[in-house]
Amino acid sequence: MSILTKNQLQIVEQSEIDALEDRLLRIRDQNDNAMGVELQRFGNAVAFSVKSIPGPSFNTVKGITGENINDMDEIVEFYSSRGIPARFEVTPGNASIDLFRKLSTMGFFQSGFHTALYRPLSMEEIPDKRQDNAIHVEEISLVNFNIFGELYTKGFGMPAAFKDYVTANNKVLAESDNWNFYLARVGNEPAGIAVLFINNDVATLAASATVPEFRNKGVQTALIQKRMQQAANEGCRYLVGQAAFGSVSQKNMERAGLKIAYTNAVWEKV
């Protein structure tokens, strides 16, 4: 694999922004924006907000650079006016001493890391791995989409009451050609789900989860391989993914040939 270039770094970061923006804009268009989705741009930075989901996944600033120092007060106000804590993800390529100093003087601290991974794609370079006969991966159709919410909540340890909510918010994505949803079975038992987002010639490994009783059986490896093959078949030049630093998800992606592009520094309020 060739050395990562500055242009490729930008492609990886933009893929994160594109996937989240596409997801939230589609959710915003449902039920008169009942979820309270709002996005605001500050140059290349994008502040994402979902009022009904106050957690960090959808309430974060991506693409922030040293050029946004004069925007910081307005960005923080964007969140505080909505009663949501501001959260910034800073990539090494966009980091600067002045930006970190500004965040610190505003009462923010670095609370964690998040890894972005990538690999170039071509049909010739995708290994023809023989899938474990015990694991079968198929696309989830709109007809049987309810299974996605069921496995997602089980895989992430969420209350079962969230199942219909998760199903509805992802089904709107499945109606788009940009999003593909997959189901893995072990034997004949539903074991895991995964999502692939394709924009132009970049494919993003979006959410994936395995239900507890089927972990450590190669389910996520099979789901990554399926999505990688799909991305190559559709002519994508790059496959990218994100994972908590040092997590099992990161290790699974690295085993599939993805390499670390960078590690985001996550900044939150003291």
Image (tube, rainbow, N blue to C red):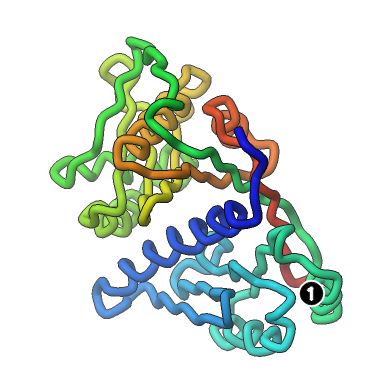
* Looking at the image, residue 255 lies above or below residue 162: above
- The residue drawn where x is 58% and y is 62% is 56
User: Relative to residue 86, is residue 135 drawn left or right?
Assistant: left
Dividing the picture into quadrants, the one containing residue 139 is: top left
Q: Check disc 1: other Cα within 10 Å, few if <14, some if 14-19, many if 20+.
A: some
Q: Depth check: 53 or 95 in front?
A: 95
Given residues 153 and 114, the one toward you in this image is 114
Residue 173 in view, yes or no: yes
Give the residue displayed 26% in from the left and 18% down from the top.
Answer: 188
Where 104 sits versus 247, above or below? Answer: below
- Say which of 203 and 205 sits in front: 203
Please give left or right for residue 121 compared with residue 80 in the image: left
Q: How far from the left and from the top, in percent, is residue 121?
A: 45, 37
Coordinates of residue 155 in the picture (x, y in percent): 45, 37
Q: Give the image location of residue 87, x and y in percent.
A: 65, 69
The residue at which mark 1 appears reads as 99
Determine the residue positioned at 62% across, 37% down.
2
Residue 213 showing in the rendered view = no
What residue is at 33 percent from the left and 49 percent from the top? 163
Label 1 is placed on what type of residue? Leu
Residue 117 vs 187, above or below: the answer is: below
In the picture, the quarter occupied by the N terminus is: top right
Quarter of the rendering occupied by the C terminus: bottom right
Name the residue nearer the viewer: 55 or 6.
6
